Image (spheres, rainbow, N blue to C red):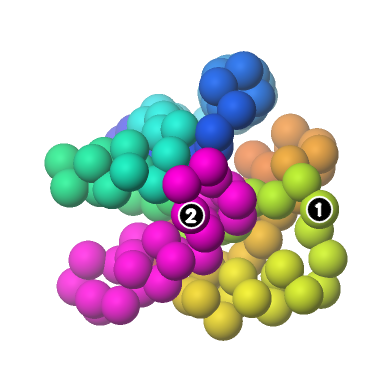
Amino acid sequence: MEKRILLVEDNAQFRATFARALELAAESLEVVFVEAGSLAEARARLSEGGLDAALIDVRPPDGDGLDLVRELNDGADSSIPTLVLTAYLDHNVAARAMDAGAQGALSKVVSVPETTEAIKRLTSSGR
């Protein structure tokens, strides 16, 4: 069954390239990315429902991505597994992501196979 993953990233070119690379590399993953370029767009996609997981940029143009992670984890009934994406991954960012309720944090420059494996773990977590 195909998994629907929300991808929140303000750079449209990166977002499209990232999603396409993962779709091509992860044939066994069976995912479709629901893209959003801002927190406002992400909230609109979330209100439509049917999402299995989320990859959220830490710094979208209209706020803090960790605020969205917190919102996703505030209501136990509606929470979805989440990974945080950042250009500058360090211990502080990873710790803040986990404190907000994310399952982890990934660097945007991580390899496609590593990202694919992280998404597999995220979507099979059965949350």
Left or right of residue 38: residue 58: right
- In what element is the residue under mark 2? loop
Which residue is labeled 1 in the image?
Answer: 88
Which residue is labeled 2 in the image?
Answer: 63
Q: How many numbered tags mark residues here?
A: 2
Instruction: Classify 126 as above or below 100.
Output: above
Left or right of residue 45: residue 87: right
Residue drawn at (17%, 47%), measured in percent from left and top?
Answer: 47
The answer to whether any part of residue 121 appears in the image is no
Residue drawn at (23%, 41%), measured in percent from left and top?
Answer: 44
Q: Position of residue 109 (x, y in %)?
A: 81, 39
Report the residue that reaches farthest toward the front.
62
Density class for disc 1 (Cα within 10 Å; few <14, some 14-19, many ≥20) is: few
The answer to whether any part of residue 54 appears in the image is yes
- Residue toward you, 18 or 41: 41
Type of amino acid at the residue the image marks with label 1: Tyr
Instruction: Classify 43 as above or below 15.
Output: below
The part of the image, by quadrant, that contains residue 115 is top right
Magenta residue span: 56-80
Q: Quadrant of the C terminus?
A: bottom left
Instruction: Classify 56 as above or below 81.
Output: above
Q: In which quarter of the image is the N terminus?
A: top left
Type of amino acid at the residue the image marks with label 2: Gly
